[in-house]
Image: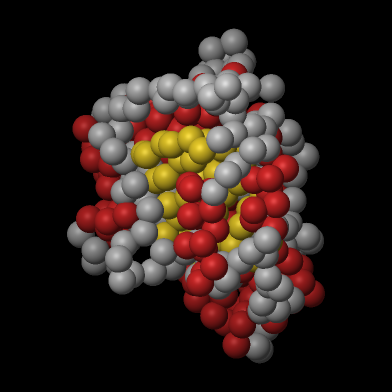
Amino acid sequence: MNPPVLLLPVLQSAGQVLAQTNGCLGLITLNRPEALNALSLAMIRDITVLLKAWALDPAIEAVVILGAGRPGKPAAFCAGGDIRFFHQAALAQDAALDDFFTEEYALNHLIHNYAKPYIALMDGVVMGGGMGISQGAKLRVLTEGSKLAMPETHIGLFPDVGGGYFLSQCPGHVGEWLALTGQTLGAGDAIELGLGDVYVQSAAMPALIAAFKQGMQSSAEHVVATVMEHVDLAPAADPKTLRGRIDEHFALPDMAAIMASLAVADDAWAQQTLATLRKRSPLMLAVTLEQIRRARGMSLADDLRMERNIVHHCFHLRPGANSETVEGIRALAVDKDHQPRWQPARIEELVREQVLAFFESPWSPEQHPLRELK
């Protein structure tokens, strides 16, 4: 008897997401390599459609997601959400911006709770939204080219897509450090801190992907075994992630105390960390610290609902160009002057009530756009 012919769902992203099946395996390729596979709303919708369809299809037993490469250039899994779209949509008051975050966070929740093995090949850049579609994977595969980060504070945002949930689970106060600084991690550090599972050399990735696309994939166990055949010993963790130094500063109660502690430390790491924080929005640093600490006691669903509240306020509490996020994107990616005009400009000018306003839900529990998440 011939195996059943699987019908793929109709996709809407005009080729930005590619899908294929091989035996029991469903393969998703993010296909926007010129933009480092940054997520558009259409891509989020296509990935969601595929995962929901495959969850119900008994012929599909496992899913692999990867990013398309650019010939002759370093790999990129996914560099995050499309921040230029955020900027344009916020200024135009486009409702698609709200849809983007609601649907992205629902997708993050779906991945974390997916009933079948979901494997993320996290080669190259894995930032922001790329972390959101990979941290919930049953198997997170890293290479020496992997660069993991949640760099949202750089644009006056906060580490969303479930960042409160998965960063707060890092040992000690590493989550606060990663969230506030946007520090990039290599494979060894990421595995050590619980943000990755196994290491495969970049040189072995083409053979692994070829095995997924052309080799016989007869069961979920075989799919996982295909990965494990290519696994190697991960590089040693970088000494910069030494826990004691991070905990000494980032366990302190608020941003003013953290920055004051770094300021009196006499080591180069502390001074470099302080210099990084001084470039960020004081308001969004304080919001981010509050987010991570609240999330530490939350379920994923509750964290995503909280993040949906926060991101609403990022664009609506101070609408248009007055938004810290719109200003941060302008400075980094639109005008590219790297001179954001933060309000307030200094942590000492921040009032606690400004931070707490981000945590007030604009919706009742019955009206929350993510009310159905369990």
Identity of the residue drawn at 69% across and 29% down: 115
Name above or below for residue 368 compared with residue 183: above
Q: Quadrant of the N terminus?
A: top right
Answer with left or right where residue 324 lies relative to residue 192.
left
Identity of the residue drawn at 34% across and 27% down: 11
Q: Residue 323 location in percent, x, y?
A: 35, 43
**Number of residue marks:** 0
**Is residue 182 in view?**
no
Q: Quadrant of the C terminus?
A: top right
**Is residue 116 in view?**
yes
Name above or below for residue 154 compared with residue 166: below
Identity of the residue drawn at 67% across and 37% down: 219
Q: Residue furthest top?
A: 366
Q: How is the image coloured?
A: secondary structure
Q: Residue 47 location in percent, x, y?
A: 45, 33
Q: Residue 23 location in percent, x, y?
A: 56, 35
Residue nearer the viewer, 58 or 338: 58
Name above or below for residue 32 compared with residue 196: above
Answer with left or right where residue 12 lies relative to residue 126.
left
Name above or below for residue 295 compared with residue 144: above
Residue nearer the viewer, 257 or 55: 55
Q: Residue 306 location in percent, x, y?
A: 60, 33
Identity of the residue drawn at 50% across and 76% down: 275
Residue nearer the viewer, 179 or 6: 6
Answer with left or right where residue 189 lies relative to residue 44.
right
Residue nearer the viewer, 335 or 162: 162
Q: Residue furthest front?
A: 1
